[in-house]
Amino acid sequence: TSHHSHTDTAPTPHSVFIAHSRRATMATATGPHTRLNISCFLFQCFIIAYSRGDGVTVEHPDCRLFIAESTIPNAGLGIFTGTDLQEGDAVAEPDIVVPLPDHEWHASEDTDFWFLWNDYSWHPAEVGMNSDMEDGHALVIGTGCMPNCNFALINTIESKPDYDHAGLHRSKDVGISGFTGFHNQRMFTTRTVPAGGELFVSYGEHWFADRTDIVGAVPFHLNFERVDKFLKKFKKMSLKYQKSDNPDFTRDLWDVIKTGSTYDTRNRNALPLSFEDMQSAQAIGSAESRLPQSVRTLEWLNEHGRCMDNIRPGNSTIPQAGRGAFASRKILKGGLVAPGPLLHIANRTALNLYDEGDDGIRDTTKPVGMQLIINYCFGHKQSTVILCPYTSPSAYINHNSESPNAKIVWSKDSTPSHNTDWLEENVEFLKTTDKIGLSLDFVATREIQPGEEVLIDYGPEWEVAWNKYKKGWSPLARSDKYVPASMLQEPFRTATEQLSQPYPDNIVFYCHYEYEIGVSEGPWVWEDEWKELALYPCRIFSREASDAERTAYYYTMVILNENELEYGIIPPLVGIPSGENHILTNVPRWAIEVRDKLYTKDEFLSKSFRHEMMMPNEIFPETWKNL
């Protein structure tokens, strides 16, 4: 089964690598191939070509970021820069990151369909969330799940997010658990990118290695290096045997290489397709030669793409809402505020949270809540279907039922990756559809001025639920003591100081250390190369100022033994035996990691507000109303 974004582009008669937002597949058209027994030419082509799509005309010629059909055939959507970028430039507005904790455990019996978020998510460790939950996914809404991956053309990298709740605190603010505190994850360029260039990010070679049966033999960096070496040998060989009576010898020989085998290898798929591509690759390298094929003209993008930077994030003007979306330029009535390509969830119960029963197995008779991602998605009271936009700016748009200045509508028929015929299908069709294919647009209902907050109506059901939650809310016990680890300041308190001023229960310190049976307890003087060692839970014993001005400190740390570990603390692979006190001295601040215990951040609070935004009845498909 091909798992990729929908496109109406006709397939080419070659093997085509396609990828979209953490997903890829290898589509091979049927066609005659001559099999030749030439063992040194086990290569095949890797094509990156233009695909033409018809989209919404962009109203703002100064748009800095577009979403449009990818330059990789059959890959669905890609993102493109509208301006020349230099190495190190920030590409787009910051993303938010939503944790999806322990989803496999909670949803093991509710997900009888392909859960699309699995293919658009990050491993928690990649966004610094690995100490916040035992298992699960990190959903990076925006550029974190939109770019394609092409190892020949990777030009961006993502930072880790910041963590705070825009000044709200669990001891006094009812809205604290209704939105994610993980924000400000940025995409930066790793090389120059011309205006119109598609942005690519690395999914990691392991992602493709684990999916070879689905995506085929996708070439890695090493494969392009090997092809470059081969092209040098090919050039020498062709010059040696070139004859004046056959000026096309080199071209003919390349055609033999190109069609001489159908074996699927990463080296073959890294080889240039055409003779002209091969000549370019000989001059500048096989990977670099693909760059011109990944650039669209700004005229094309203005005609076929949609602008992604009409809004920007900031602290909301709505009480308890956290962050909001603000117009970055004037938006005319009826104009596009933000595009909203969708990930569909056929059954909302896939987002349920459950408690453990007496038998240690989840108790499905008593859901205790829902995953936080539900707050960023749309639904309908008569349907199990949930629709989640995955563009970053739209995730910041807040609610106002009295004077909204924007609304949602279905995208135009010509919008890439939007299939209006899906709106006539039933929910069973959505269950069996393992690719994206729907899109909303956020459009202005009146003229919106630069700097004005963009607001939509979440629907009366949402508002009733929110007002009921506010009325019954009260802070949890000891919530006034909570301080997130990200807010902890130096100097850290010594063991003596903590007797009168203990740290909150959620705080854990980690130190780099390596325990071996029989090793001395120390004390060991810190060495900078130890930063590569594993992390062990530890506690502060004492500190010393590094200079007279006390601008920095060195700490003496005690590694926690097995008797001191408790729930919420991530244990090391090899524990320290009970009773032993392994000591590190002269440890600098940068070598100490401060983390929250498992499930203690605001996103994991019990009895949190969870409710999807409601789609207007007049645009919700009748065939999806299955309740």
Image (spheres, grey):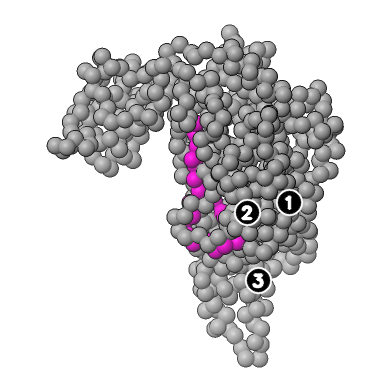
Name the residue carrying label 3.
274
Residue at point 47% right, 31% down? 166
Q: Residue 528 in the image: x percent, y percent?
A: 26, 42
Instruction: From the viewer's side, name the closer residue of 473 and 184.
Output: 473
Q: Quadrant of the C terminus?
A: top right
Residue visible at 68% across and 29% down in the picture: 402
Residue 572, percent across and down? Answer: 38, 27
Nearest to N terminus: mark 3 or mark 2: 2
Q: Nearer the viewer, residue 79 or 306?
A: 306
**Which disc, if any, is residue 66?**
2
Looking at the rendered structure, the kind of residue marked 2 is Phe
Residue 126: numbered disc: none
Percent across and percent down for residue 565 are: 36, 18
Q: First in sequence: mark 1 or mark 2?
A: 2
**Left or right of 256, for residue 235:** left
Disc 1 target residue: 416
Q: Are marks 3 and 1 in contact (CB under 8 Å)?
A: no
Q: Which amino acid type is shown beneath numbered disc 3?
A: Ser
Magenta residues span: 181-203
| Lower sequence index among marks 3 and 1 | 3
Q: Is residue 389 magenta?
A: no
Q: Is 198 covered by the magenta stretch?
A: yes
Residue drawn at (54%, 49%), measured in percent from left and top?
A: 92
Q: As shown in the figure, which amino acid type bears the numbered disc 1?
A: Pro
User: Which marked residue is nearer to the observer: mark 1 or mark 2?
Assistant: 2
Relative to residue 566, is residue 595 depicted above or below? below
Observer-nearest residue: 527 or 52? 52
Cα separation, mark 1 vs mark 2, equals: 13 Å
